[in-house]
Amino acid sequence: MVNRRSHKKKEESSSERWLVTYVDMITLLLIFFIVMYTLSKVDVAKFETLAESLSAVFGAGGMVLDSPGPEVIPGSPPEKIHDVVEQDEQIKEQLELMQLSNLQKKLEEYIEKNGLASRVSVDMEERGIVLSFQEAVLFDLGSAQLTPYAYQILTKLTPLMINIPNYIRIEGHTDDLPISTSRYPSNWELSAARSTNVLQAMINDFGFAPWKMSATAYGQYRPRVTNSSSENRQLNRRVDLVILRNKFAEVEPNNILNSTVTN
């Protein structure tokens, strides 16, 4: 009797094993359809926007869509497409600010480490990062020729900036003391020569791309402080290296040589 009962229980157990397999299959199907449903709800446009923006900022060569059409989200109304574009711009702006903030920290660390804080400053302005060199750091008084010390400083600082995709503008400034020499008839020529020489050094000696560089001269007319003392005049005699935020690059002339510079 005992053997019969044991045998009967084994037969019943064997006959019910298919239920385990069936339950497993149903569970897997349920999970599969849940996953499919979840994926169908993912905003593909937002995902692609984020991925492409990250790719562009970190140098992978990705291109953010300039004017996404209805094919980005089939059947989407224009309002939704506009929202996607606006979100894309916000993502790009946040990534750019993170990148510039990181660069600012690196520049500040170098300046502090080398005891240059009294003569070199770096600030984040609305237009971008402004790296400001007082005259004595780069030039002799009344000269536009870069000193050997200037090359030492630029050799350390330029590698931190060379991979930044933003436009870079070099601005020359002087104080209000008049200058009149055969080489520099006025402060306009002196400030222009200084900004141009810094630009040429960055291109020819440090490998910066010329199409993203520009030089401008302000003479004595954009002082940092009033020219009321020799100390103040020293602050005003400077060269500012401005790393422009991309939104300000829109006012720059069209660049047919490299149309992807700000993407």
Image (cartoon, rainbow, N blue to C red):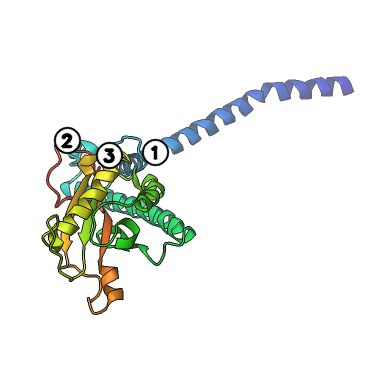
Q: Quadrant of the C terminus?
A: top left
The image quadrant that residue 73 belongs to is top left
Q: Rounded to the nearest whole Å, what is the CA distance between mark 3 and mark 2?
A: 19 Å
Residue behind mark 3: 204
SS category of the residue bearing label 3:
helix
Residue behind mark 1: 39
Residue placed furthest toward the front? 182
Asked whether, in this view, residue 92 is left or right of residue 70, the answer is: right
Going by the numbered disc 1, the residue's amino acid type is Leu
The image quadrant that residue 255 belongs to is top left
- Which residue: 34% across, 43% down? 162
SS category of the residue bearing label 1:
helix
Query: Upstream in the sequence, badge 3 or badge 2?
Result: 3
Q: Nearer the viewer, residue 255 or 62?
A: 255
Going by the numbered disc 3, the residue's amino acid type is Asn
Label 1 environment density (alpha carbons within 10 Å; few <14, some 14–19, many ≥20): few
Q: Are marks 2 and 1 in contact (CB under 8 Å)?
A: no
